[in-house]
Amino acid sequence: MREKLLVAIREHVAAEYPKEACGVVVQAQVGQIYIPCRNTSDKPTDHFSLAPEDYLAAEEQGEVLMIIHSHPDVAQLIPSEMDRIQCDHSGVEWGIMSWPDGDFCTFSPREDRDLVGRRWVLGHADCWTLVMAYYLQEHCIQLNNWSVDYEWWVDGKESRYDDNWRAEGFIEVPVTEMREGDMIMMQIGAPVTNHAAIYLGNNIILHHNFGNLSTRVPYGEYWRNRTVRVVRRKELMNAKNTDA
């Protein structure tokens, strides 16, 4: 990155410290420029939320090439999993500057990510977002995002799975007729259905359990005893069963 851009970023980061600063690098007619934006997060010393209107205003000046933010008072500058997930969603390169150290790093959106081995981030990388990723990668089916960053299932007042699976285009099928690509909905330590897995065939499921890496595991007694229903996307109702 050009030194003049780093100088502009550094000045903004220093001015916002100890809050996280945020902004964008834009390809304008005069060349690449850094545009400071407002951090509207409720906890600006820990997180950043780039004001949407500031981003739109920056786009009017040119193509957004990079999203920038700062990490105040860190021992080592390492992008968090949340940073990487948001970068994936943004579709553009990201840059982070630590402060007061002034170190700088960049990283790009990850493409064709493996469904196994994803780190857990509630509301952003959990069982439902894995289900979404599976259907998009394997069947080009886009599901709505029902994940939120709080444990909605604890008191039983919300039923995000039970209330929405039909609207997402799923149809219940008998467990005995389960086949590859079906979604298994479960109730684990909660008063409502709060977990989902994808059946991969050969008695293997793909899921992202609370606090763990996403993984493939046998559909054993523990998971079977907690199964509430098995559902299939309407587009896959007539698909050939390839399960051995």
Image (cartoon, rainbow, N blue to C red):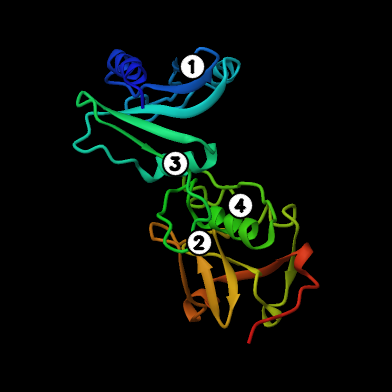
Q: CA distance from mark 4 to mark 2?
A: 25 Å
- Pointer 2: what residue? 115
Q: Does dot 3 land on a helix, a strand or a loop? A: loop
Residue matched to label 3:
108
Q: Nearer the viewer, residue 29 or 242?
A: 29
Looking at the rendered structure, the kind of residue marked 2 is Leu
Q: Secondary structure at mark 2?
A: loop
- Any part of residue 128 in sight: yes
Residues marked 4 and 1 touching at CB (< 8 Å):
no
The residue sitting at 31% across, 16% down in the picture is 7
Mark 4 touches mark 3? (CB < 8 Å): no
Task: Name the front one of labels 4 and 2.
Answer: 2
Q: Which residue is depicted at the point 54% across and 73% down?
A: 205
Q: Earlier in the sequence, mark 4 or mark 3?
A: 3
Point out the frontmost of discs 3 and 2.
3
Q: Quadrant of the N terminus?
A: top left
Q: Which residue is mark 1?
A: 31
Residue underneath mark 4: 159
